[in-house]
Image (cartoon, rainbow, N blue to C red):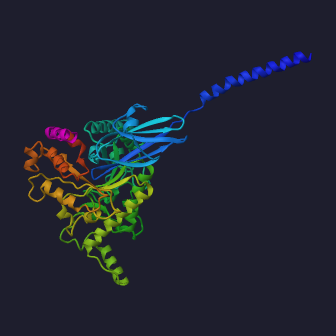
Amino acid sequence: MFKRKWKFILAWMLLFVFAINQAVPAMAATEEVTEPTIKATYRVLNQKATVTYEVKSEAKLKSVTYLQGLVTLENSIRWSVSGKKLSESGSFDVKKSGYYTLRAEDVNGGVTLQNIYVDMEFKAVWISYLEFKSTGYTKDEFEAQIDEMFDNVVDMGMNAVIVHVRPFGDAMYDSSYFPWSKYISGTQGKDPGFDPLEYMVEAAHDRGLQFHAWLNPYRVTTKNTDVKTLAANNPARKWLTDKKTANDRNVLSFDGNLYYNPAVTEVRTLIRNGVLEIVQNYDVDGIHFDDYFYPTLGSNYEKIFDAPEYKTYVASCKAHGEKILPIDEWRRQNVNLLVKGIYSEIKNENPDVVFGISPGGFLDTLRMKDRYYVDVDRWLSEPGYVDYICPQLYWSFEHKQYPFDGILNRWLELRKNTDVNVYVGIPVYKSASNDEPDFKKNANILADMIKTCRDTKLVDGYMFFRYDNFYSNTAQKAVNNLLKVLNK
């Protein structure tokens, strides 16, 4: 009896051990084996690219290395022969365009490769509100147009798009501050039912393009001052139609247009908040302002536009014994307060997002006392304002006042802060036009502009105005010549 019971117990024990032995390999087989992950980005400054990378691993890392070139084999002999050792996270500098491959290996033998293409030149296309329909889009229509445009931008050899997301105090995204743009829904303030900016950012990144959100900070309307044509939730309309008189001058009418008043703190706060919500809610690579700041005020500039705010400023300075700036310098200070504040907000939220401005290229005009009031001399020499400047150099080599090569050199001489990139705005829209004889007769003019920029060894890239002009029938020869040189 005892012997039978013992055999029975022994049989069950053997069966249990057998089951455990079978289960352990099965459990091990289903256990997830992790490998290191690598995230890499880069930025170009003065013809040198800095690749910043971060490696994460659940197991202890054994090695991190990188090679120039596109390497697809984890155990290629090249890793041991010419691989350059790296720390777990950090950065390294390169001076040539092309692929770079990073390799991370952990102590368990897990290996990950990550490649990144570094382009030593920033090559971007401006896509303005003019490329979009004022009658609005369905979701499918909009996405199809973006897919086509971004595919074409890639085919041109570009690596970035600069897309208008706020052309007239409105928004091509779901904003807490500005109404929906009519260039997405057909009517200002009308919700299109989808998020255009979210799709554009994703579509750009899927194609390896940087996405820079292009904003006009002060412009509310052009050729129209009727606030009733603005959406009910437009802050300009609300300020001008509410019962509060204190905010009536937040929006100014001048020369048939409406502008946000650059001298008002509440306005600067609105514009900063509008930038910050984009950086917080969307994975943009940059924020971009163009050349619309103060309007051209003319000979009466001391007595119009924001002159009442200047009088208040003067009275305050006298009351406090402070130095009084001339009105032109005071206006430049107003713009600087906005620019510096936006730069600071962006960097506090996400240091990887760049902020840049594309002023008109006419340096002498920018320094006049009656217009623009953009302090490019300061922006190119002091930290804390911009990451890049892109002057719009829209003249031929034969232009009497602003020959392309001459004005280019003048701009480059202004850069005293080497942390600021200098890009050049190229006028594709002028190719084969009657604007200047050289644009009409010389099909190599755009290509020659690129060659001239490269010869300086100081230009960091280009922006091309604008997308539609690449497909002008009369410009095709000049465009083809441009792209051949650009992509050499």
Q: Is residue 164 above or below residue 22?
A: below
314 left or right of 448? right
Please state which of residues 192 and 327 is positioned toward the viewer in this rendering.
327
Question: Any magenta on residue 226?
Answer: no
Please state which of residues 136 and 444 is positioned toward the viewer in this rendering.
444
Q: Residue at x 35, y 46 (%)?
A: 211
Q: Give the quarter of the image for residue 419.
A: bottom left
Point out the residue furthest to the front here.
Answer: 81
Q: Is residue 482 visible?
A: yes
Q: Which residues are magenta?
A: 471-488
Please state which of residues 129 and 253 is positioned toward the viewer in this rendering.
129
Label total for image? 0
Rendered location of residue 431, percent (x, y) = 14, 45
Q: Is residue 243 above or below residue 77?
A: below
80 left or right of 3? left
Q: Is residue 470 above or below residue 339?
A: above
Q: Is residue 273 visible?
A: no
Question: Any magenta on residue 486?
Answer: yes
Point out the residue furthest to the right here.
Answer: 1
Please state which of residues 348 and 217 is positioned toward the viewer in this rendering.
348
- The quadrant of the picture occupied by the N terminus is top right
Q: Give the quarter of the image for residue 308.
A: bottom left
98 left or right of 57? left
Q: Give the quarter of the image for residue 96.
A: top left
- The quadrant of the picture occupied by the C terminus is top left
The rendered magenta stretch, by its main secondary structure, is classed as: helix
Rendered location of residue 219, percent (x, y) = 30, 58
Rendered location of residue 335, percent (x, y) = 31, 65
